[in-house]
Structure formats: structure tokens, C-alpha cells
Amino acid sequence: MRDLAKHQGLRNQLVSLLERKGITDKNVLEAIRKIPRHLFLNSSFEDFAYQDKPFPIAAGQTISQPYTVAFQTELLQVKKDDKVLEIGTGSGYQTAVLYTMGAKVYSIERQNELFKSTSLLLPKLGIRPKHLAFGDGYKGLPNFAPFDSIIVTAGAPYIPQPLMAQLKIGGRLVIPVGEDVQVMTLLVRKNETQFEKHEFGDFRFVPLLEDKN
Ligand code: SAH
């Protein structure tokens, strides 16, 4: 598949829709305007790739809806050269958004099939995360910590303590918390022991799985 003028046209329309839905961070919107989302999907979804919808990817997982990607990324307040940890690499689309915004991206995926295919895809698209890991996102990446921000792209039944510990002071953790429905939650680290918590309404994600395959 290639990236054609018609795809760019559809991306411009998607960005306008995200603005109407309340996304204001220009860097987020410009990243979404640039990234060929159709190349992160199976070719049978090419015609739908710029609808504001989630789609199935391999291993029974989903690529998040663009609005959700934009909403979470806006909450992170990404600045150039920020060190960002993503839990749930999946298709690599969110990884690409963070990279395009100038972040140094670290990402973890527990499905080997997705880890392998996305590790091959991203360099082909010129996207170079600092580190892609195959493993359990509940544990974070202690060897690379601390991070300016952490984004969890699967629904977490609770906030994993290691992720809080791997955040810099002033850092931001964006995580959907809940079982069937998740509340988008932002934790801002105030000091060694204190975190400020903000909640932003309901979303639906595939589950952040623990200790099983
Ligand atoms: N950011 C992805 C979203 C994929 S859906 C994208 O843009 O496409 C969420 C992903 O989280 C799935 O790929 C799933 O396999 C992964 N996941 C679930 N539990 C996980 C865990 N404990 N550690 C790492 N990844 C996990």
C-alpha cells in the first residue's frame, strides 16, 4: 500500500473532525495529519482507515479510535525530546504519533505476533522508537526509567505501582482504569510520594492483561 493524495485528503477531514470534537493541541493534530494510518491496518480496511473508529489488528487486539489517541496524547502534554513510555504497542500507530511529535519513545507489547510485525513496520515508515520491548507492561521498563510521561493504551483494572514509580517528578501518567468500561485517568507526580489525580470520562479499551497469554 502507498500513501496517496486521497489519503492525505481523508486525513485532513479527520483532523477537522478531531478539532470539532475538542482536540486543540496543534502538535497532536499535525502528527495525525502526517501519519498514514491506513498503513497500520490490514489492507482490507484501507477505505475505512480515516474514519474515527477502532479496527481489529492481529492477535485479537484493536488499533484505538483516532479521537482516543488524540485525547490521551493531548493529556500527556508531550514536548520535544520527552522520554515517553507506551504500554501496548499494538499496531504502532500511537508510537508513531509520539515519535512524530519529537518524543523519545519506549514501548512494550505482550503479544509476540504484534511485537514482531510492528518492529518490522515502523522502520519502514521512518519511525524510530528508542526501544521496543516484548514483555509485560505492568512492570514498565525499570532499566530505562524515569520517564517524562507514560501512556497506557489498554484498559487497566488498577494503576500498576511500578508505572507510578517510573515517572519523573512533574511527570504525567495517562491510563484508562476499569474493568468493562474505563475512566480516563491522569496522574501528575508532585513529589516522591504524592500524585494528583484527574478523571476525564468513560472510554472502552481491550484489557491490559496480567500473568496470562
Ligand atoms: N497503542 C496501540 C493500541 C493497541 S490495543 C495502537 O495504537 O495500535 C492495546 C495493546 O495492549 C494490545 O496490542 C495488547 O496486546 C497490549 N497489551 C495488553 N496487555 C498488555 C501488557 N500487560 N503489557 C503490554 N502490552 C499489553
Image (tube, helix red, strand yellow):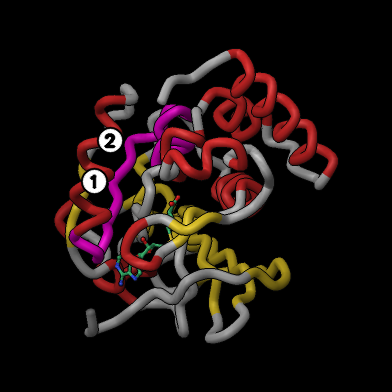
Residue occupying image coordinates x 60% and y 13%: 5
Left or right, residue 40 beside residue 205? left
Instruction: Relative to 177, say whether 99 is above or below.
Output: above
Amino acid type of the residue tagged 1 in the rendering? Ser
When the figure is inspected, residue 186 is found, relative to residue 86, above or below; the finding is below
Residue 126: percent from the left, percent from the top? 31, 22
Is residue 179 toward the left or the right of residue 134 in the image?
A: right
Tell me residue 161's x, y (percent): 35, 77
Residue placed under numbered mark 2 in the picture: 121
Give the residue drawn at x 48%, y 54%: 63
Q: Which residue is mark 1?
A: 117
Residue reaching furthest to the top: 5
> Could you tell me residue 154's position as x and y percent?
45, 67
Q: Secondary structure at mark 1?
A: helix
Q: Which residues are magenta?
A: 95-112
Q: Position of residue 50 (x, y in %)?
A: 63, 38
